[in-house]
Amino acid sequence: MSLAAYCIICCRRMGTSTPPPKSNTYWRDVRNIIKFTGSLILGGSLFITYEVLALKKSLTLDTQVVEKEKMKSYIYVHTVSLDKRENHGITYQARKELHKAVRKVLATSARILRGPFADTFSTIDIEDHECAVWLLLRKSKSDDRAARLQAVQEMAETRHWHDYQYRIIAQACDLRTLIGLARSKDSDLRFFLCPPPLPSLKEDSSVEEELRQLLASLPQTDLDECIQYFTSLALSESSQSLAAQKGGLWCFGGNGLPYAESFGEVPSATVEMFCLEALVKHSEIPTHCDKIEANGGLQLLQRLYQLHKDCPKVQRNIMRILGNMALNEHLHSTIVRSGWVSILVEAIKSHHIMEASHAARTLANLDRETVQDKYQDGVYVLHPQYRTSQPIKADVLFIHGLMGAAFKTWRQQDNDQNLTGKVSEDETKYTTCWPKSWLARDCPALRIISVEYDTSLSDWRARCPMERKSIAFRSNELLRKLRAAGVGDRPMIWVSHSMGGLLVKKMLLEASKKPEMSTIINNTRGIIFYSVPHHGSHLAEYSVNIRYLLFPSLEVKELSKDSPALKTLQDDFLEFAKDRNFQVLSFVETLPTYIGSMIKLHVVPLESADLGIGDLIPVDVNHLNICKPKKKDAFLYQRTLQFIRDTLAKDLEN
């Protein structure tokens, strides 16, 4: 008021005063203007300062409390008091309206100074250093796929955040972002919340009993013979395990005989393995996956996984089940909510290649943002196992042979380190899978896939005695799985050992007869054969002991030199390969192989390994080591690498 009165008085004086002499009029007017303007500025500054200080005093927060809350590893949700007396009255309404006004001011300033926040973040009072977290969260939920991928990449590359900021992301991100972080190589483990507490076991129950109940709850009709076999075996062996605990000989005779390799084995653990084998087969059926989830299978498998941390076989079977369930997209949210993602992230970062590859398969099946292919049981991506900005231009597929496996067949030649079971973090000294360790580094633009399937020398030793799978049956089965994994969409090279080469030949011939598989033929650039018995093997004529002699498996029978199916396969493929102009490289052993402790056998002689086209290179190793280089600079690996680079040269340049 005093400021306004002073301004009026000054104006009246200027209006009523007598005109001064002209010489002084100009300077007098300047002085009056300065007085008026200065008074106005001074008074306005004092008023604004007073109002700002008053507003600041009314909105002051206890910063110590705020900082303590920030350091929590969880997010608080503001609650409203249940006391009705506190929620009514003039004071309450005035505070409520004031808070609304402050929020509007903060939201407006945020839009002006920082860019618009999402609606969910527009009412949050955050500091400057907090903006990155919430902006990345908002960006990760964008409708633009490229923006989402960039947000996940920026989160994964962040190293300077506090613990509570990682926890904010862990709790606020959606499923798509969480899986993206899990498949980012350098992501911090704090992005992933620990699994929720597992439900308590029922009274007077055990994990084994719960597992059997889960298996018994699944449909038992219209099943494959092997699924029926594993299910009945698992459900019937429990009584035998109890008898063993009372002093009887466990599993002596009966269905369990193929598994009774050691009477010192813990019966309960073995019964759990039977159940898991059966669940692996059941999980290949989508409707059975729904039953497993509905009956608490995800939590039960997690409990079993934690109980058997020192048993890789149990953990691998659990991962196989989980990977099969992840093929069903409607189960993804349930798998994530059950807490499996944090377990999978730890597994994929493991130095054990088998453990990491099983986890990588499951996460790839969960990742529908960057992966369109689906990896069924037995199909493992060795590279890339994480999301990558490196464009993938070609595929290399590894197919093992009789009694082989997706990983152990392609290890470095055995040494003392491998025999003791130790895993070296330095893969330049020893690798348990050279395609993943060496080839992936030398050719990063390749997708490297290894395939696994069950084989046996004898029906006595078969994992499923009802299973009589010929080369023709297996080739069709693998062809279907590989096509689901996107094999055929890019140029590719097949790498095979022993009987695996026969499967490759059969797969290519079968694919040539099916229009939907034509891309596999059109994109096949070359094949590498490691001691493949194109004309049969002496293995079918010998045995490790009397069991194998009396009950040779169908795979062994088909390898005999007088096998009509083998001769037809060789003739048909030779003509087909010449017509398609495939590039072929063949290696063959020159040293005999010890089979058991009694027999020394030249498994694949030189004449049998000769396909009839391409180069044939003899190597001074036995049948088992023909696909296992001694070291990275060994001729065996370097020649293989040269063939891959030369054959795919044009495709890798594009």
Image: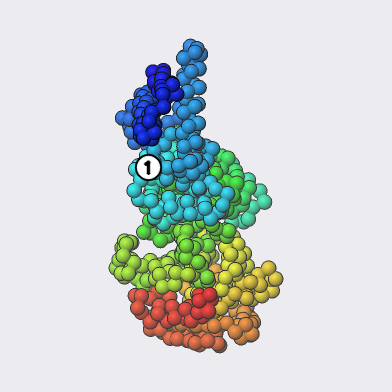
On the question of residue 134 being in view, the answer is: no
Q: Position of residue 599 (x, y in %)?
A: 41, 76
Amino acid at the residue labelled 1: His
How many numbered tags mark residues here? Answer: 1
Which colour scheme appears in the figure? rainbow
Q: Is residue 611 above or below residue 165?
A: below
Q: Position of residue 157 (x, y in %)?
A: 39, 54
Vertical relation: 395 (above or below) 422 = below
Q: Position of residue 307 (x, y in %)?
A: 40, 44
In x, y percent, where is residue 58? 38, 23
Question: Quarter-wise, where is residue 217 in the image?
Answer: top right
Q: Closest to the observer: 442 or 207?
A: 442
Secondary element at tag 1? helix
Viewer can see residue 75: yes
**Relative to 37, is 516 above or below?**
below
Q: Quadrant of the N terminus?
A: top left
Residue at screen point 35% across, 71% down: 414
The residue shown at (52%, 70%) is: 393
Rendering quarter of residue 518: bottom right
Task: Please tell me which residue is depicted at 56% across the width and 78% down the height of the picture.
Answer: 525
Q: Residues within 10 Å of mark 1 (few under 14, many from 20)?
A: few
Which residue is nearer to you in this view: 374 or 131? Answer: 131
Q: Which residue is mark 1?
A: 129
Name the residue located 49 percent from the left edge and 35 percent from the top edge. Answer: 107
